[in-house]
Structures are given as C-alpha cells and as structure tokens.
Image (spheres, grey):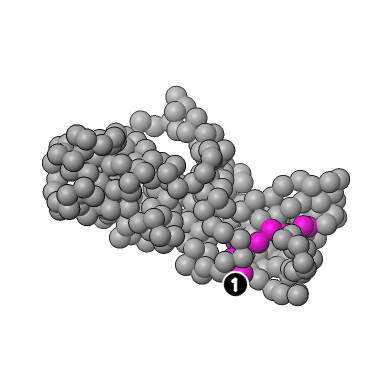
Amino acid sequence: MIYHAEGVVLRSQAFGEADRIVTLLTRSEGKVRAAARGVRRTRSRLMGPTQLFTYGSYLLVRGRSDLETLSQGEIRESLRNLREDLERMAYASYACELVDRMVEEREADEPVFFLVLQVLRQMDAGADPFGLARYLELALLDHLGYQPQLDGCLGCGRAWQPGPGWGLNGSEGGLLCPECATSRPVRRLSPGSVESLRRLRSLSAARAGVLRFAAGTGREVRDALKDLLDARVEGPLKARAFLESLELAPWKEETHGRAGPD
C-alpha cells in the first residue's frame, strides 16, 4: 500500500551505512516506523525532511513487515530552533521520546498529533519549555486514559480544598487528603502545586507556554507528574536524565516564575 501522510519526526536512528530508521507521528496513520534509504548521503533529498522534530508531508510504502519505506518527503515546518538551542532541544527531545513511548504504533489519534505539533511549535517560537513539558505530560495522561484525580481524595472522596497535608500517589493516580495520606506512600504537595496542576488541565499549549512557576512549585509539579508517568511508562526515559541535568546546571535561573493570573 502506498499512501501520503503528514507527520512529525519523533525519532531518527542511523541504520547501516547510509540509511535511517525514522519514527513519525502521523495525522492519519498514527505512529509509524519507516526506513529512509540512502538518507545519510550528502545529496539525499530526504535529509531535511527526516531531521528530528521536522513537520512534513511524506510518501510511505507499507508492506508485510512492521517497518515501512519512506520514499519521498517535503518539509512543511522545519522547527529548526529546536535543533539549534541546547535547552529547547533537550525539552523537545523529551517530549518526542515521551510520546513515542506512550503511543501505540498504527493507531491514528488526531488530538495527540495536534497536541505534539502545537507543543513543538510553541517551543520553537521561544515559549517557556518547562511549562509546555508539564502541559504535555498531563494532557497525554488525560487523553490516553490515565487521567489523574485532582479534584479530591482517591481514598475517601473528600473534595479538594487548599490546605496542608495533601499528597499525590503516582501508582494510584491522584490526590490523597491529609488523613488518607497517613496510611499510603505519597509525595506531599503544597496548595500552590495542586492548584498549578489543576490549572494546567484547562489551558491551551499557547497559554501553557507563558505559565510561570515559583521554583519550589515547579519542582513539585514536575516530580508529581514524573510519579504519575513512571507508574505507566515502562523503563527510564533517556532524554529526561539529560533534561534534569540541565535543570540543575548552576547557570540556570532559580525560578520559572509563578503560576499566577493571566
């Protein structure tokens, strides 16, 4: 079967002497893996369209194997800033790896396709990648059926009210009130962190890119989402380790700002 598809390059691996195995998140076919023959040769027309993070139009050939053949490609948006800035590249790599690990092959899902494209576009345009990464994490959990409970206690059903002692249990998938948290392993969260998580759920990618967190709140939100993801994604995410080393670098600012009014 020969078909056209628009897609985003999530992953690109060298294969053999001149080829690449490219993982595309496509709008119409979902996630597909395809061999790009001769793409690493200097004059290959596929070199540009198969670069990481590129949004393009592709001609693919599907045979009997799980690996398809990418025969043609045209760049729609290169999103080149994501490859030229270390911090943006780290966050975009993490976003793509996370999607690659959470999405099944050949299962079309337009909302996820547009979610990823919007997040990468915002990162490329210079929006804060920290907030966008948190937005993507929560949006994927919500959309793929792992929606964390952020409106009340998983144990007793008590509605969320700002106050001390609330925590989050990643394996159970949500908040626990101060009483229920005493008998379960939890990550304690400040009221501001819980409100930031709840607010993320109501934002668009564009709004998430201007969201600001106090340093302590940002760490709590990041770690809470990490707990939720670790309970649902097998094995470590390679890009996360590099990203965390960047976030701890001495030249980084101490704050991502505060999640306050628009």
The residues colored magenta run: 25-36
Q: Main secondary structure of the magenta part?
A: strand
Q: Which residue is mark 1?
A: 28
Residue 33 is covered by the magenta coloring: yes
Whether residue 133 is visible to the viewer of this picture, yes or no, is no
How many tags in the picture?
Answer: 1
> Residue shown at 83%/57% (left/top)?
37
In the rendered image, residue 71, in percent from the top left (x then y), is placed at 79, 66
Residue drawn 69% across the image and 58% down it? 33
Q: Residue placed at 22% from the left, 44% from the top? A: 176
The residue lying at 51 percent from left, 59 percent from top is 116
Question: Is 97 situated left or right of 184 in this image?
Answer: right
Q: Is 128 on the left or on the right of 211, as rendered?
A: right
Quadrant of the rendering where the N terminus is positioned: bottom right
Kind of residue at disc 1: Ser
Q: Nearer the viewer, residue 230 or 172?
A: 172
Camera-side residue: 184 or 214? Answer: 184
Q: In the image, residue 149 lies at what x, y percent?
A: 28, 53
**Is residue 2 among the parts visible in the rendering?**
yes
